[in-house]
Amino acid sequence: MLPFRRAAIHEKVVQAIVYPVTLVLAAMVLVPFVMTLALSFGDVDDFWAGRKWPDLRHLRNPGRFYIHYLATRYDYWGSMTGFDELYGVQTDAAGTILALPAVPELKGAWRKRAADGIDCLRLLPWTHFRPLFTGWFYYRGCSANDFAAFTGLTELDWKRYLKATYGTIERVNAKFGTTFISFPSVKVPGLASLGDRSGFPAADPWLAEYIAFLKTTVKRERCLPLLGDAAWRGWLRVQPEIGGDLARLNAALGGTYPAWSDVTLSETVPAPGPARRYWETFVRTVVSPYLLELKVTPGLEQSFQKFLRGRHGSGEAVQARYGAPPESVRLPANARDLASATAYADWDAFSREAPAEVIMARGADAWWRQFLREKYGTPERAAEAWGVPVPGFDAVPWPQPEIDRLDWANHRFEYTREVLFKNYRRVWSLMTDATSSLLNTALFAIVFTVLSVAVNAGAAYVLSRFGLGPIQMSLVFFLALAAFPIEAMAVPNFLLLRNLGLLNSLWALVLPTAVNGYYIYLLKSYFDAIPRSYYEEATLEGASEWRLFWFVGIPLAAPMLAVVGLYALLWSYANFMWALIVCQQRAHWTLPVMLFNMNTWAATPMLAAAIMIAVLPPLVVFIFAHRTLQRSLALPRF
């Protein structure tokens, strides 16, 4: 037993200095990791605000969380114009909500109006919704490029629907004539909007598939309708003679509106006066034909048939396009159910020339007022049901604030989860679908590790087992190669792989780097330490050289083989430069290459989430393999 000795004073001083310094340095190593983890839960607002830590106080503050919910729901590429018009609330240039009325309590009129609004939403045609705003949360942690657009849950469901229906993106492209590179790159089809009078989407099979998906999958209360009032106010604001000024608006329209929120789009043409000219211009040039209806009369239908003859040149031309003579072609009241692009274009052109008295602007708010009239009959009955005064149905705005509040309250847990993990969900989709980088990296790491261990172990065994004389100098050659980084041999290796046709393949990553002089040296040292008597005894038992290698050498060198395998696994997982050179096609990207490309377009929170996912596998491997690394530092004893 060793005698006990008290530590000297100078030893205690050294310990008192070294231990705290070591702890501080260890903590400094963890700081970047902790900061990256925190940033991965933030959004682009935290980045632009210069926050080092994400502002997640809204998760425990209902009022702040509700504002955050509205900001993420209505933000579309940094624009909050639709929210401004719908809520009448000011936002700054960055789209941040500056003020919001008190969060309404889900009692009485609020809840009943929200329920009525949801019932009305379920009656609206799908042409009356904004397809780009059909999601819950839009991922503000990413930017817009060819496969990372702002995306909501409904759009993710749309991509999952296509993947479940068709299996591969190639089948989708073959059926619909699209050119998507992956399922995450799929966009929502462009349905008609209040500002779009061009094109004919109804005959498009791609749009038909999307509408079929909406009808069977999407809950309409999570969709935003196209409101004529909001679009009307937005259009009036930008007119040069009005310029967003309420007094100039009243002068131009001859009205007495006390606030912009009181300006509504009349369903029918106003009486002769200043407002009539603005109404006709807006309806004929801005509003989509899908949101218009015509009051069809025999006289109007005859005018339409005459219009067709003049538009197409003759009755024969009309019959060739419609399959019937002009006098048999009927004028539909709206364009929603037209079956051909020709019929749509003709109806659109005729609505621009039809008398204003037969045109009706039927946005979602017009459907809302009609719904109230049919359900309650009189404003008094609506006031009795809601418990608040209702001066008239035309004065009741679309209840989007109430619908949003009710939906937020009913799905607060889902929204909380989405706020926290939105970046991780998007990054995971990119890694698994957009680039297959996770799968490519896993295959590369597994194949490279197995091949590297097998080849280097075989070479080390041969060099250790047999006295090959001058050939032993080959070990020096291998070690010399290990002194040069792979980048030094990049050009000749690249040219060789190109001539062999192996670029953009798994073998381009594996073959040039499988043999490693350093690994051979480590394994040879381990094989040299195995006593020769072990081999001799096995030889006397009749073992062949292969059995000696497999049943004697490999088991005894297992600790060093595990270390070599671990080094090879971690090196292949983190290999960036060589993968960037030989695998430039997106379908063959590895994880480091994808992270490098994300750095050129992704916002910081999304990039932080990608880094956290990328570092997780090596961290897990190190936790479970650190004892193996420690054993490899000790000399073998047999």
Image (spheres, helix red, strand yellow):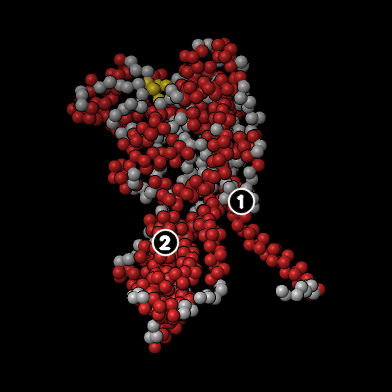
Query: Does any portion of residue 414 appear in the rendered image?
Result: yes
1 or 2: tag closer to the N-terminus: 1
Q: Nearer the viewer, residue 384 or 488?
A: 488
Check disc 1 and report its element: helix, strand or loop: helix
> Which residue carries the number 2 mark?
446
Name the residue furthest right: 9
At horizontal 20% and vertical 24% (from top left) the residue drawn is: 324
Q: CA distance from mark 1 to mark 2?
A: 31 Å
Q: Nearer the viewer, residue 274 or 630?
A: 630
Residue receiving disc 1? 38
Seen at 43% across and 59% down, the residue is 441
Q: Is residue 93 left or right of residue 24?
A: left
Is the residue under label 2 in contact with that under label 1 (CB below 8 Å)? Answer: no
- The correct choice, above or below, for 158 with respect to 439 in the image is above
Tell me if residue 37 comes above or below residue 548 in the rendering: above
- Specify the quadrant that holds the N terminus: bottom right
Residue 27 or 16: which is nearer the viewer?
16
Label annotation for residue 265 = none
The residue nearer to you, when weighing 396 against 426, is 426
Question: Residue 69's image quarter?
Answer: top right
Q: Amino acid at mark 1?
A: Ala
**Disc 1 residue crowd, few under 14, some 14–19, many 20+, Cα 10 Å:** some
443 lies above or below 243: below
Please tell me how crowded label 2 is: few (under 14), some (14-19), or many (20+) other residues with Cα within 10 Å.
some
Which mark is nearer the camera, 1 or 2?
2
Report x, y in % for residue 186. Answer: 39, 44
**Circle 2 sits in a helix, a strand or a loop, which is it?**
helix
- Pinpoint residue 78: horizontal percent, then vertical percent: 54, 43
